[in-house]
Image (tube, rainbow, N blue to C red):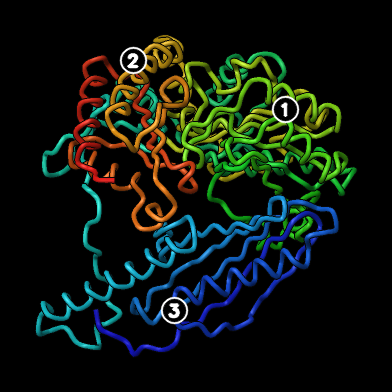
Amino acid sequence: MTRTETTPLRATASRVVLPEDCATRWGNEGLEVLSTPAILGEMERLCAEGMGRFLKPGQMSVGVTVTMNHRAAAPVGATVHYEVTAAAVDRRTEFAFTVRDETGTVLCDGNHRRAVVDLERFHAQLTASEKEEKVSAAPTTNATDATAPTAPPPQRPVAVRARGARVWDERGREYIDGSSGAVCVNLGHGVPEVLDAMRTQAERITFVHRSQFAHHAVQDLSAEILSIAGPGYREVVYTNSGSEATETALRLALHHHAADPARAVVLTQFPSYHGMTAGALGVSGHPPRRRHLDALHNGSATTVPVAPGDPGRLLPDLADWRAAFARTGPARVAAVLLEPVGGAASGACEVPDEVLHGLRDLCDASGALLAVDEVMTGFGRTGWWFGHSRSGVTPDLVVTGKGLSAGYTPIGACLVGDRVLPGWSATDLAFGHTMGGNPLSAATALAVLAYTREHDLPGRAERAGAVLREGLAETAASVPFLGAPRGCGLLLALPIHQNLEGFARAPLAARICAAAERNGLIVYPAGVDHRYQALLVAPPLTIDDADLRELLTRLRAAVTEVDA
């Protein structure tokens, strides 16, 4: 790596998403900034300015997001992406930060102080790394090959094989997959029945496009999903991921309300996480495919987070949702979207059945659609086929992903209720994606669901989850910074008690995950801030009793290494 001349950092506020029917941009406005604190401070100012301009008289909550990209002087030539979200709830303003490097890897998130500390540490690490490279550089290195591609140093173990709940790296080290990857490997690794189905389908046909051919694998998969979902659903729209399935649900909600363009508000639970996609259609010159979706691109479509009114609660209760409907205006709500059991955002916080029933009533009374995000919870993870199943509520739209293929192939799906777009094909309106519903992925998912049924994996998740919960409770009882486990089935989390200052310096979840890896265990950090910080423990639904006991043994060893 050859050092470049340092210059003041420049950042441009490239996007501002404002609430309800308001939108503005601070495009092409150069901001001279000299340090990470200055960047974040300027972004706070822009957020506050946005809220000051658009918080209407009597309105008690508003959300603003500002994003910036800049090419930094230190680290050398690195592009860093900053995103700041400001939320004013009951006139109290809170800021949240997410900072990513040029690969999209999250460098830090949380509060301002943590963002500053972690970014300066990131800068320092890259600077130190650069100095080491300069010292050890070969004599042939010169300025002419400064742009030559270089392989980054390995950051993670290199996995080479996996079976069941265990993964091996290239050094021969073995790990228990205590998080099912990113909470998706429901069946475990290397299930012969699934691999055989993939092989058989690959030898027949791997791809046809839905506009040209139908296919038995897709038809059979749709029939199986609708059978699992039960009465009230008529169609399955296929995507490549849960994120795409979420976007599909939002688009279908707007299509459903096409005759009433003022219905462009989506109420979402805070905290929550629904995927990483951006509005690619917004940069497409294809008017027919933008029909009825202008609200996604002209700023009139708005996401309004619904946070708990009581700081002592982690999720909003029914009174909070009723207040959000009243503030927004029921006639303006297109849909409500929430996770029945949280994952990366809340750390397995559960929405009570009475809240789901109340939301169903609110949506029915107002004409809004009820959508649930079952990407992480769907197809057995919670001890039920879906996270909302226990409540008996029938949502209008169900978003699925991870568990549908158990990590064996990319696929997502949106289940469409009978009341959504009657008389129309949701698949045709969604337009979909090139690879959406391809025969290979469909055959793989069909084999996954068949295996899930035959081995009663929802039941297995409930039984194994009870054993795991008991073991986690015993572990937490001996560690002062861990709370009682929460969640259901094999989607469980250990809450982590850490004050704001400690969280800003070094979140315990990341340190526990690192210690767990050293002990041959993979677990998953969760929580949008210090109040929600938790350790997700979500092994494959097929994990046997011996591996479950070993998982707990390794976890106990890991937490004893961590000094709070």
Residue 42 drawn at (x, y percent): 57, 75
Q: Determine which residue is flagged by label 1.
A: 396
Towards the viewer: 343 or 96: 96
Q: Quadrant of the N terminus?
A: bottom left
Q: Which mark is residue 467?
A: 2
Local packing at callout 2 (Cα closer than 10 Å; few below 14, some 14-19, many 20+) is: some
Residue shown at the point (85%, 39%) measured from the top left = 330
The three-letter amino acid code for the residue at tag 2 is Val
Residue shown at the point (39%, 60%) measured from the top left = 107
Q: Determine which residue is flagged by label 3.
A: 35
Residue 207 drawn at (x, y percent): 49, 37
Mark 2 or mark 1: name the one nearer the start of the chain: 1
The three-letter amino acid code for the residue at tag 1 is Asp
Q: Is residue 145 visible?
A: yes
Left or right: 531 in relation to 245: left
Verify CB contact (< 8 Å) between mark 3 and mark 2: no
Residue 429 drawn at (x, y percent): 74, 40
User: Which quarter of the picture shows residue 159?
Assistant: top left
Secondary structure at badge 3 equals loop
Left or right: 318 in relation to 441: right
Q: Is residue 447 visible?
A: no
Q: CA distance from mark 3 to mark 1?
A: 47 Å
Left or right: 426 in relation to 423: left
Towards the viewer: 17 or 119: 119
Residue 211 drawn at (x, y percent): 65, 39
Towards the viewer: 503 or 334: 503
